Image (cartoon, helix red, strand yellow):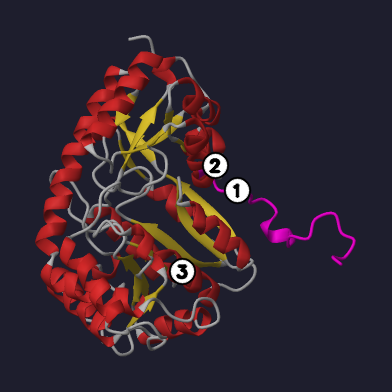
Amino acid sequence: MLPAVDEPLVARMRQFGETIFAEMTRLAAETGSINLGQGFPDTDGPRSLLEGAIRRIEQGVNQYPPGPGRVELRSAVAADRAQRYGLEYDPETEVYITVGATAGIAAGVLGLIEPGDEVVLFEPMYDSYAGVIALAGGVRRPVTLRPSASEGGRFTFDADELRAAVGPRTRMIIVNSPHNPTGTVLTSAELDVIARVCRENDLIALTDEVYEHLTFDDAVHIPLATRQGMRDRTVAVSSAGKAFSVTAWKTGWVMGPEPLVRAVRTVNQFLTFTANGALQLAIADAIRDEMAWVGAQRDALQRKRDRLAAGLREAGFEVLRPQGTYFVMTDIRPLGFTDGIELARALPRTAGVAAVPAQVLYDNLDEGRHLVRFAFCKRDEVLDEAVTRLTRHAGR
């Protein structure tokens, strides 16, 4: 029998319930809506990747792989990082495989943050950041990204606000670029500001780079670890799911100096221990052989971004053009709405389309109350039907 308590959930997690992504996906299923809320593609990755996983499973790669991950994948990740960004990591001690990037981020925060330590991060924020900081007993210190009129609505931060967010208890900064949900790709100048704040305040940086290959137009992903003094104070996290359109495979990796990676590994061995070995081997092959497919996928996503953005404008939304990721942020005020949660909960029933209200990804709710996020990583006919429904709903 359970103890006689009103709420068995630990106090530090009581602010969290069903994630907005789960809620909107459930609403989409209940109403038969087109789901442009949760960010997953509706097409598969390269055939060789899928066949590689099947082959390894049939060959008997079905038991625990080594705790740090298969050396084949760790070596492929290290080689790609060196070739692409000039960052050298020892695959034996400085690359570690996790069950998706989310597990790597969680183990990084839990392994490096003491109760009461402060974590600076940019809002709107991917929702797992807030949850794992709470699990660690840390304190969030958000810095708001806001659209810049001079940059066509690109979201950016104020350097003075970033500096002001850092205090004597600040231990870590979490940096997500390309950024979910705004689509911002941080520039070298912005990264240099962050790097200087880290150096001057002796901060650890945890970088979420899962969309590193999905940048558009002339935007280029630059890892924070490449900036002055940052290689040895940065835990970088990425994964296969977004780049290769296999989000359910949940295979990610952590890269950084050995002491920081060891902290992640020490925690993660008691969380998920290790990740699927057959998938790791298939992904290792794809990193070596299928990056041209990733480039073509990026180009296709840029076209999908433009396709959905044009349709959303026709439906009355103000579109804030993203530089990367799967997502486009919209301002709903031109439609006569001011509350994104209210609109997002109504759209599945009134328009047959699901989206995500951005305000749930802010600590400062008013900053994002008027913003709604749509995913464009869907087939063209799905995007077109969603636009048709939204346009009809708006009476246009």
Residue with the most extreme right position: 4
> Looking at the magenta stretch, what is its main secondary structure?
loop
Whether residue 87 appears in this view of the structure is no
The 10 Å Cα crowd at callout 1, few under 14, some 14 to 19, many 20 or more, is few
**Where does label 1 land, which residue?**
18
Q: How many angstroms separate mark 1 from mark 2 (CA)? A: 7 Å
Q: Nearer the viewer, residue 254 or 76?
A: 76
At 28% across and 60% down in the image, what residue appears? 192
Q: How many angstroms separate mark 3 from mark 2 (CA)? A: 21 Å
Tell me where the magenta segment starts and ends, as one range: 1-20
Numbered mark located on residue 103 in the image: 3
At 32% across and 85% down in the image, what residue appears? 60
- The answer to if 19 sits in the magenta stretch is yes
> At label 1, which amino acid type do we have?
Glu
Labelled pair 1, 2 in contact (Cβ < 8 Å):
yes
Q: Of helix, strand and loop, which one carries label 3?
A: helix
> At label 2, which amino acid type do we have?
Glu
| Marked residue nearer the N-terminal end (3 or 2) | 2
At 78% across and 60% down in the image, what residue appears? 8
Q: Of helix, strand and loop, which one carries label 1?
A: loop
Residue 29 pos. (x, y %): 48, 38
Whether residue 128 appears in this view of the structure is yes
